[in-house]
Image: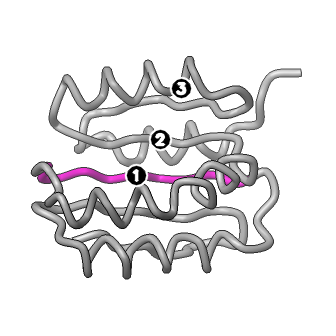
Amino acid sequence: MLTVTKPAPHRLDVTLRGALDAEGMRAGLDDLLEMAEGIVGGRMLYRIPEFAVPSLGALGVELSRLPRLLRLLDRFERCAVLSDSAWLRRVAEVEGALVPGLEIAAFPLEAEAEAVAWLDRRAAA
């Protein structure tokens, strides 16, 4: 399941839990794109408590929305990734090094308060 909430005008929280099929991916990405409208200098908290490889249908849905998802990145300055999986945290940090203008930091799942504090800090001038 991919759920998206907007706890503040500049922040989205995304939770990815378990296996994702095409319909779940479609609904989650549609929510993400809709809720991101109008955000400038945004922050994203991405929780991954249980990761499972998405279905082929889900991957197809994601690929079909890829241009819009890439443009979405310009709306965000920081993303904190919470996961108990060390390899997922490492992938997130590598992705942060590859995406210009987006800082990504990864934290263990139980470090949500630390992740939110990092998101809320202003970038050093």
- Left or right for 84, reference 34: left
Q: How far apart are labels 2 and 1 at the CA level?
A: 6 Å
Q: Examine the image and state in which quarter residue 109 appears.
A: top left
Q: How far apart are labels 3 and 2 at the CA level?
A: 10 Å
Q: Secondary structure at mark 2?
A: strand
Q: Label 3, on which residue? A: 96
Q: Residues within 10 Å of mark 3 (few under 14, many from 20)?
A: some
Q: Label 1, on which residue? A: 46
Which numbered dot is residue 80? 2
- Left or right for 81, reference 51: right
Q: Nearer the viewer, mark 3 or mark 2?
A: 3
Instruction: Provide residue 76's location: percent of width, then percent of height.
Output: 69, 49
Q: Are marks 2 and 1 in contact (CB under 8 Å)?
A: yes
Q: Examine the image and state in which quarter residue 117 appears.
A: top right
In the foreground, 40 or 122: 40
Instruction: Provide residue 71's location: percent of width, then percent of height.
Output: 70, 53
Q: Are marks 3 and 2 in contact (CB under 8 Å)?
A: no
Instruction: Provide residue 9's location: percent of width, then percent of height.
Output: 71, 72
